């Protein structure tokens, strides 16, 4: 039992240090969030709701910037 914990830590470190799964590294944060939002994990839909709220806020900011830019060009 005394050697179990160090062996477990070494085994987990060895398993997690490989670079075999490059496809997960190539996904953007938004893509990972989208996959999560469409999963069946409890409360995963909240991720999708948060993404829609962020998109809505970003669109409002872009529109406000566009209006501000149009009024300052004269």
Image (cartoon, rainbow, N blue to C red):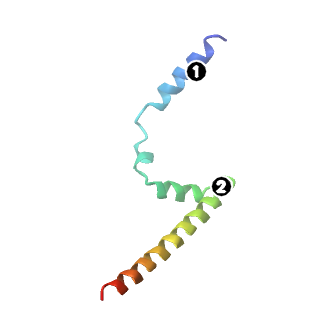
Residue 34: x, y in percent? 53, 59
| Label 2 vs label 1, nearer the camera | 1
Residue at figure coordinates x 58%, y 21% from the top left: 8
**Percent position of residue 48, x then y:** 59, 63
Of the 4 image quadrants, the one containing the N terminus is top right
Q: Nearer the viewer, residue 51 or 16?
A: 51
Q: Residues within 10 Å of mark 2 (few under 14, many from 20)?
A: few
Give the crowd class for mark 1: few <14, some 14-19, many >=20 residues within 10 Å: few
The outermost residue toward the bottom is 74
Q: Looking at the image, is 53 positioned above or below residue 70?
A: above
The number of discs equals: 2
Distance of label 2 from label 1 (alpha carbons): 30 Å
Q: Is residue 50 above or below residue 5?
A: below
Check the image and name the residue furthest to the right: 42
Question: Which of these two is toward me, 43 or 15?
Answer: 43
Q: Earlier in the sequence, mark 2 or mark 1?
A: 1
Per the rendering, the mark at residue 23 is none
The residue depicted at 60 percent of the width and 11 percent of the height is: 3
Which residue lies most toward the top here?
2
Q: Residue at x 40, y 43 (%)?
A: 22
Instruction: Determine which quarter of the picture holds residue 52.
Output: bottom right
> Horizontally, is 47 left or right of 63 in the view?
right
Mark number displayed over residue 40: 2
Q: Residue at x 64, y 10 (%)?
A: 2
Residue hosting label 1: 8
- In the rendered view, does 34 fall on the left or right side of 1? left
Percent position (x, y) of residue 5? 61, 18
Quadrant where the C terminus sits is bottom left
Element carrying mark 2: loop
Secondary structure beneath disc 1?
helix
Q: Where residue 67 sits in the image (x, y, percent)?
A: 41, 83
């Amino acid at each position: 039992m005394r050697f179990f914990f160090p062996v477990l830590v070494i085994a987990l470190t060895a398993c997690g240090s490989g670079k075999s799964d490059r496809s997960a590294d190539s996904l953007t944060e938004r893509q990972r969030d989208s996959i999560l939002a469409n999963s069946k994990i409890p409360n995963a839909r909240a991720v999708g709701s948060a993404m829609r709220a962020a998109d809505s806020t970003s669109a409002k900011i872009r529109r406000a910037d566009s209006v501000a830019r149009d009024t300052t060009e004269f």
